[in-house]
Image (spheres, rainbow, N blue to C red):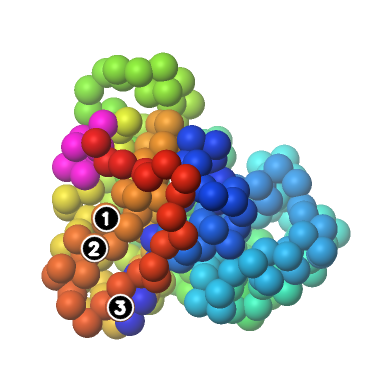
């Protein structure tokens, strides 16, 4: 029984970690969103360093390159093959490969997604994130497509963030960039993945995830291994918030093991 929690990155200057490294981050959280792979495929040496910097039970959810998902027409081409090859050193640390699709990808494009997913190596797990609201109004066809290959549907819960107008520069910036997605709380596989966007206010962020605590606890009792990623507009408190979310779920599921002891930052991260 494991709950993975993590952030959108493993280093942020505001966190003031004693060493701004992946290994330090891995003492705070046990998962991370691999957003950097969306922009460029890393070198084999870089990925080997990621593996060496994290414990065996740390998990990466790696985003497929945009040249495949956004401009490449979901083709299993040489770029996709190169990406698969370089992430091999992570082994079981690769929790899922994340297929984030653009808002222009709609229900009519599902045949292309089905062909693409069926052509991927079957020794990885896959998770798909869609941005067209039409999928949420009529989810059956996407769910059937994902079920063909045992892939998960990744919801991005932005409902708390968009509940009231922004109140900081970071919130105003995120207001323009983040998608207003319908709420989805269903899991398709034994490895559900949730992306949650709160506010710069800790109180607002925690209030907004209250619905998720019993849902995630329920998944754990069912034998699933969920992953919950915490975002805020400035992400200053994100590592601490991840640990707080884990603690709140563990209060409902005492059999869940605690997160490891942290490497203390130079200046303590605070929720208040």
For mark 1, what is the residue?
244
> On the rendered image, what quadrant is the N terminus found in?
bottom left
Seen in the picture, residue 96 relative to 7 is either above or below; the reply is: below
Q: Which residue occupies the extreme right position in the image?
A: 78
Q: Residue at x 18, y 75 (%)?
A: 253
The rendered magenta stretch, by its main secondary structure, is classed as: helix
> On the rendered image, what quadrant is the C terminus found in?
top left
Frontmost residue, 184 versus 45: 45
Seen in the picture, residue 228 relative to 158 is either above or below; the reply is: below
Q: Residue at x 51, y 48 (%)?
A: 17
The residue range painted magenta reads 201-208
Look at the image and say whether residue 206 sits in the magenta stretch.
yes
Is residue 215 something one can see in this rendering?
no
Frontmost residue, 4 versus 39: 4
Residues at marks 1 and 2 touching, judged by CB atoms closer than 8 Å: yes
Q: Separation of disc 1 and disc 2 at Cα? A: 5 Å
- Position in image of residue 159 (x %, y %): 27, 37
Q: Which residue occupies the extreme front position in the image?
A: 266
For mark 2, what is the residue?
247
Q: Residue at x 73, y 74 (%)?
A: 89
Q: Residue at x 55, y 37 (%)?
A: 13
At label 3, counting other C-alpha atoms closer than 10 Å, the crowd grade (few under 14, some 14-19, many 20 or more) is few
Q: Separation of disc 3 and disc 2 at Cα? A: 10 Å
């Amino acid at each position: 029984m494991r709950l993975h929690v993590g952030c959108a990155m493993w280093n942020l200057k505001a966190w003031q970690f004693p060493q701004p490294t992946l290994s330090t981050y891995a003492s705070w959280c046990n998962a991370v969103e691999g957003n950097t792979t969306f922009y460029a495929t890393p070198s084999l040496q870089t990925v080997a360093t990621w593996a060496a910097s994290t414990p065996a039970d740390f998990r990466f959810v790696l985003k497929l390159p945009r040249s495949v998902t956004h401009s490449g027409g979901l083709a299993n081409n040489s770029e996709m093959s190169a990406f698969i090859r370089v992430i091999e050193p992570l082994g079981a640390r690769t929790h899922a490969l994340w297929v984030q699709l653009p808002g222009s990808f709609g229900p009519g494009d599902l045949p292309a997604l089905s062909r693409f997913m069926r052509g991927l190596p079957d020794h990885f797990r896959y998770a798909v994130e869609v941005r067209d609201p039409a999928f949420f109004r009529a989810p059956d066809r996407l769910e059937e497509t994902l079920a063909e290959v045992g892939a998960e549907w990744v919801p991005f819960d932005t409902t708390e963030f968009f509940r009231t107008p922004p109140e900081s520069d970071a919130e105003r910036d995120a207001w323009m960039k983040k998608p207003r997605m319908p709420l989805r709380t269903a899991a398709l596989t034994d490895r559900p993945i949730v992306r949650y966007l709160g506010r710069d206010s800790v109180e607002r962020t925690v209030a907004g995830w209250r619905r998720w605590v019993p849902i995630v606890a329920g998944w754990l009792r069912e034998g699933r291994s969920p992953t919950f990623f915490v975002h805020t507009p400035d992400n200053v408190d994100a590592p601490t918030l991840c640990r707080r979310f884990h603690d709140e779920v563990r209060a409902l599921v005492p059999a869940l093991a605690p997160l490891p002891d942290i490497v203390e930052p130079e200046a303590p991260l605070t929720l208040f």
